[in-house]
Amino acid sequence: MTAPVDDVGPIASDVPMLRWPAEADRRAHLATAGRPRLLVLEPGEPPPLVWDDLEDWVRTPADPVEVQQRMATLAERAAGVVAPAPAVDADGIVRWRGEWAAVPPIEARLLAALADRLGEVVRREDLVVAAWPQGLASDRTLDGRIKHLRRRLAPLGLVIRTVRGVGFLLEAEGAA
């Protein structure tokens, strides 16, 4: 028989357990901070959409061993992750730490190239090839698109830094 896990108290861990959806605000705060979290679904509630590797959920009553294993997995993921890479889908939707933003196709291709090398410098030439595969674009065109992309990513806590004479670097805000 499984003991119900309906309280934060019985299991010790650095991974907070949150009631879903009652603690949705706390979930958003932890996601923005890049902290792991385990959601405990309230009876009859559908599970939330989870895009973040630092989040998981269980339905009550839950086996304490399963809960402990899920929390251990989240803690291991958090220990190995400086910043989870943003995901860019085919429709230009960027998802990162539980938030999302829409970007136009060219900017989505630029972002995908930057996200593939999160925290590393991507050369200007590589970004031009990624964003405009059928033709060349000027440095000025690239700079303009990067400027627009920076504005779209700011609410997500992502920044694009310029590395003069080389290219650009995508990272989490405050990572420098």
Image: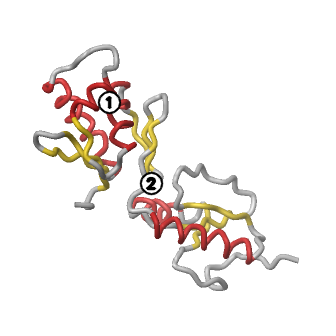
Residue 78 in the image: state x and y as whole percent. Answer: 48, 67
Q: What residue is rendered at 66% in x and 85% in y? A: 10
Q: How far apart are labels 2 and 1 at the CA level?
A: 20 Å
The image quadrant of residue 31 is bottom left
Q: Residue furthest right?
A: 1
- From the viewer's side, name the closer residue of 27 and 34: 34
162 lies left or right of 75: left
44 lies left or right of 125: right
Residue wearing tag 2? 97
The image quadrant of residue 63 is bottom right
User: SS at mark 1?
Assistant: helix
Vertical position of residue 137 compared to residue 145: above or below: above
| Pointer 2 local density, CA inside 10 Å: few below 14, some 14–19, many at least 20 | many
Residue wearing tag 1? 107
Please, what is the three-letter code of the amino acid marked with disc 2?
Answer: Arg
Asked if the residue under mark 1 is in contact with the one under mark 2, i.e. CB atoms within 8 Å, the reply is no
- From the viewer's side, name the closer residue of 121 and 13: 121
| Pointer 1 local density, CA inside 10 Å: few below 14, some 14–19, many at least 20 | many
Q: What residue is rendered at 47% in x and 28% in y? A: 91
Q: What residue is rendered at 27% in x and 36% in y? A: 149
* Disc marking residue 68: none
Image quarter in which the N terminus is found: bottom right
Residue 12 in the image: state x and y as whole percent. Answer: 60, 84
User: SS at mark 2?
Assistant: loop
